Amino acid sequence: MDNLWWIIPVLLFGSGFVGDKISAATKLRHKRKLELIKAEERRQHALATANRPPEPVCGCTHHLAMHGKDDGKCHAVVEAPSLWDADRKPVQYEPQQCNCQQYVGPEPLGTVFAPEITDLR
């Protein structure tokens, strides 16, 4: 028992060192776990975006449904500037019909049912 006097300082000072190492490792593990969760969220978002068909949106940022089938004019109402200040920045806006003339994006395809082709031989 006389030779074990060194255990008390080792326990007092060594336990703080071990505790710091465990705390740092836990924080690093938590940080990596959060990174993995965020990466999985980004992957899921990318998959959901990839599986969605393209939206038929015009250059005026309005959907194809806002454009007339006959004349192609956009029927959306937008806020157009009507009054400017000395620095040519709009101060007042008023509602106005969108000036877009024609939707020029890809034409959406209708839903088509096609039975599976099977080899009946």
Image (cartoon, rainbow, N blue to C red):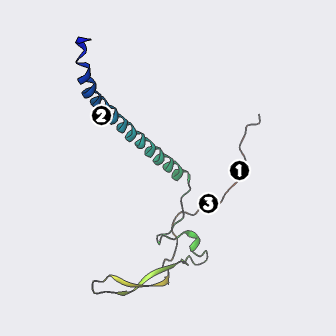
Image quarter where the N terminus lies is top left
Disc 2 designates what residue?
20
Rendering coords of residue 84 (x, y %): 34, 86
Is disc 3 placed on a helix, strand or loop? loop
Rendering coords of residue 116 (x, y %): 71, 44
**What's the residue type where badge 2 is placed?**
Asp
Question: Mark 1 or 2 closer to N-term?
Answer: 2
Disc 1 designates what residue?
114
Q: Residues within 10 Å of mark 3 (few under 14, many from 20)?
A: few
Q: Residues within 10 Å of mark 2 (few under 14, many from 20)?
A: few
* Quadrant in which residue 93 is drawn: bottom left
Query: Which residue is drawn at the image coordinates 49% and 84% (left, top)?
Result: 96
Disc 3 designates what residue?
109
* C-alpha separation, residue under disc 1 versus residue under disc 3: 14 Å
* C-alpha separation, residue under disc 3 versus residue under disc 2: 62 Å
Question: Mark 3 or 2 closer to N-term?
Answer: 2
